[in-house]
Amino acid sequence: MDVKLANPRGFCAGVDRAIDIVNRALEVFGAPIYVRHEVVHNKFVVDDLRERGAVFVEELDEVPDDRIVIFSAHGVSQAVRQEADARGLKVFDATCPLVTKVHIEVARYSAEGRECVLIGHTGHPEVEGTMGQYDYGAGGDIYLVEDETQVATLEVRNPEKLSYVTQTTLSMDDTARVIDALRERFPAITGPRKDDICYATQNRQDAVKQMAVDCDLVLVVGSPNSSNSNRLRELAERMGADAYLLDRAQQIEADWVLGKRHVGVTAGASAPEVLVQEVIDRLRELGADAIVESSGRPENVTFSMPRELRLHPVD
């Protein structure tokens, strides 16, 4: 049995930045540092930050007065920002800049009096934050659709002034089909000049497509609540491989690799490389005798942390 490692895999620039912001805030200001929602969707990362003094909450009313709060990489609504301002909370924003780009698009559409369709998954924090950027003052609305079926029944107020945006971590192929359905149903609809799906999501999906063709089994390192990790598992299955999503190497069962000759391994954009190495060690225990790194698209994107954190001396 050989193991093929997808490239690129694991942490993206937005996740790196979000984790760095929490770690730096803990260094500069000390614990506790409050974080609204899991800063990234990975259990290992969140547990590590929690041990260092990060306190994860779902709503701002769980944050005491005069405390520091960090917004997660998934972004927050304007209502959450206004609540933080009203309470005078010290905020550091770890929203991924590529999510912020989508927020700006939605705000611009509402300011222009255009209605907006968001392609995304109900209940995901990125979707909630993006929906919360729309200003209803101009009389328009924002609508959420997940698939072509929902497009077929979507009713909007003004189809002649309609635009769309997407969640950044979706399946590229599924999203393309939804966009095609929107354009067929609403010929006047407009969208961003460049797809909202982020570069890291695209690159990791492309890498899995290339790898899964030659694999009997694909293991995706990532947490169950990670959207981009789930899309990688689904994509591997569509390519004909057995596929599993796992948080840690201990979850791998011997039966999964029984009779398998080629096993592919990748990691979602919020999963650290240390977990991939644990999976490799586990596969060696189960009989893997060759580890092959796939060639892939280089990623040189970096995002800087807030200036105040970057320049603030450590106490």
Image: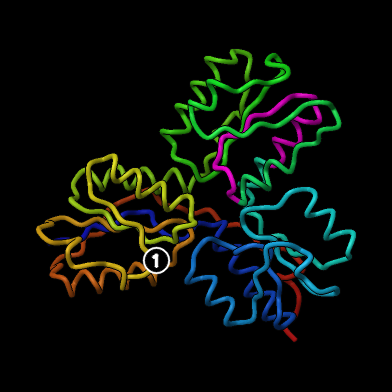
Asked if residue 10 lies left or right of residue 103, the reply is: left
Instruction: Say which amino acid is labelled 1.
Output: Asp
Asked if residue 295 lies left or right of residue 297, the reply is: left
Asked if residue 36 lies left or right of residue 16, the reply is: right
| Residue at the far bottom in the pictured view | 315
Residue receiving disc 1: 247
The quadrant where residue 57 appears: bottom right
Q: Is 161 drawn above or below residue 60 in the view shown?
A: above
Image quarter (top left, top right, bottom left or bottom right) of the C terminus: bottom right
Looking at the picture, how far across and down is residue 157, in whole percent? Answer: 73, 19
Residue located 34% across and 43% down the image: 235
| Residue at the far front in the pictured view | 153
Looking at the picture, how far across and down is residue 95, in whole percent? Answer: 66, 55
Q: Is residue 198 magenta?
A: no
Element type where label 1 sits in the image: loop
Q: Is 28 drawn above or below residue 10 in the view shown?
A: below
Image quarter (top left, top right, bottom left or bottom right) of the N terminus: bottom left
Q: Is 85 drawn above or below residue 136 in the view shown?
A: below
The quadrant where residue 51 appears: bottom right
Specify the color scheme.
rainbow
Q: Is 120 drawn above or below residue 309 in the view shown?
A: above
Looking at the picture, how far across and down is residue 100, in whole percent? Answer: 67, 47
The residue stretch that appears in magenta: 103-124
Q: Is residue 123 magenta?
A: yes
Residue located 43% across and 33% down the image: 174
